[in-house]
Amino acid sequence: MSSHREAPEIAKDPVADNTDVYAFVSPDRPDAVTLIASFIPAQNPAGGPNFYEFGDDVLYEIHIANRGTAQDDITYQFRFTTTVRNPETFLYNTGPISSIDDPAFNRPQAYSVTRVVPGRPPHVLGRRLSVPPVNVGVRSTPNYAHFTAEATHELPGGRRVFAGQRADSFHVDLGSIFDLGALRPFEHLHLIPSADAAGVNATQATNVHTIALQVPKTDLTRGGMAPTDPMSSTSVIGVYASASRQKTRIFDPHSGTTTGHGPFRQVSRQANPLFNEVIVPMGDKDRWNAVDPDQDDRFAKYVAHPELARLLPVLYPGVFTQLAAYHKRREDLLAILLTGIPAGVVPGFQNYTGTTQADLLRLNLAVPPAATPNPLGLVAGDAAGYPNGRRLDDDVVTIELRAIAGLTIPLVDPSYTPDPATTAIKDGTTNTNPPFLDHFPYLGTPSGGYQTTPGTPHT
């Protein structure tokens, strides 16, 4: 999945596992940017009695780079604290939870938000902010949607924040793709063929835990400038999210709990969707999660000659003959994923952050929201979509499959003609979880435990 269980070590630590990162100019507030980082993948809505929650021992962060170095210029930090109101019961709730501060909610969480700028004292933007309960069911959390507004907190400086459970917005046919690279809409062309079929969304009826932050554009730019010129370098920011744990963890056999000691160290990160999932090979996945993006030049060789580009002609014989014959460095992918797209490649657009190779989600803040968004984003002429940031409904699996298959090579190598199948390749899925909201925090209402038949989402 985009970054669900994408490396051996982080797959064992779901509470610190980044799933997806989104960054976009807010469609209903175009002077602001929405930054979204989700964690704790593949949540079964009925996962009680110990339901999913943020980790008190995890440092969650959203990072902004705005000076072309791929290093942190602004960081938003989130720390969570869990309270057990009644330790004498096994129940998550001792009755219906009618509001976010209802005493029947037996295991509430609260969190702080801190803005960090190097060389300045940390600025605490909010303390003791409430997290909503998970969507347990119609009796425990009736009319669940009202918790979203209750858990949306206004912060100083025109900022707002939400942290809590949401429907997973990422869609992908994992069952097919990881079955030797099969794509159900084109299975008759596969090396081991079968009848074509519609894609199956593997994240259907699953939830994630999301941190969503909306801030004025001037909160993110170099010098606090209001970006107006899409061709100016000061209009572009790089974004990634991370989770960190303290360097040492000690198990207490008397309490049965683990405590952290020492400095925090990054154990998971995420920017471009599917980067560690598909680009980085097994032997380097854990190391990738541990290093900062400004060290990503060590992984550039996997972008320049991606394994999937070699596999497609093998798995689909006779379909990707042009791709099979192309042995040059993939300068198109190096730009899209590691430096941003420089001026002169796409008319009137750039999101270039400099020569430092880094996996960052790059967003040109001067590009306004699209009046009619196209889920295929920039490759379909919608400059407000991926890889210019990432919106919730951008079909990143299709976009990246087509890019790896050679669709974007002519942008940097006009002598190349893509294979005809490149414009049709897809996994055939759409968002089959509850629909997105038209306002902050935008992600859909999480599926409820009582209401959900396995594989069928229901709010």
Image (spheres, rainbow, N blue to C red):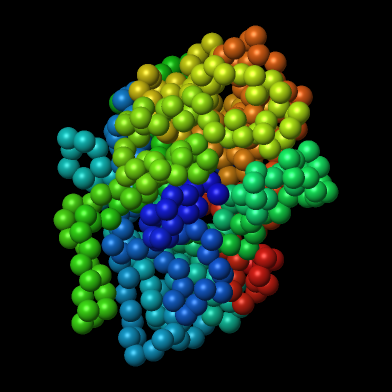
Between 22 and 112, the one lying in front of the other is: 22
Looking at the image, is 174 positioned above or below residue 357? below
The structure residue drawn at horizontal position 36% and vertical position 68%, both measured from the top left corner, is: 109
Q: Position of residue 260 (x, y in %)?
A: 21, 62
Residue 316 located left or right of residue 300: right
The structure residue drawn at horizontal position 50% and vertical position 52%, both measured from the top left corner, is: 4
Residue 180 in view, yes or no: yes
Residue 56, located in which quarter of the rendered image? bottom left
Q: How many marks?
A: 0
Between 95 and 61, the one lying in front of the other is: 61
Looking at the image, is 189 positioned above or below residue 456? above
Residue 251 located left or right of residue 8: left
Residue 449 located left or right of residue 453: left
The structure residue drawn at horizontal position 17% and vertical position 60%, both measured from the top left corner, is: 261
Q: Position of residue 122 (x, y in %)?
A: 21, 45
Q: Position of residue 311 (x, y in %)?
A: 62, 34
Give the position of the C terminus as an image quadrant. bottom right
Looking at the image, is 395 positioned above or below residue 422? below
Between 149 and 381, the one lying in front of the other is: 381
Residue 112 in view, yes or no: no
Q: Position of residue 263 (x, y in %)?
A: 18, 52
Q: Residue lying farthest bottom?
A: 88
Between 354 and 6, the one lying in front of the other is: 6
The structure residue drawn at horizontal position 32% and vertical position 74%, both measured from the top left corner, is: 83
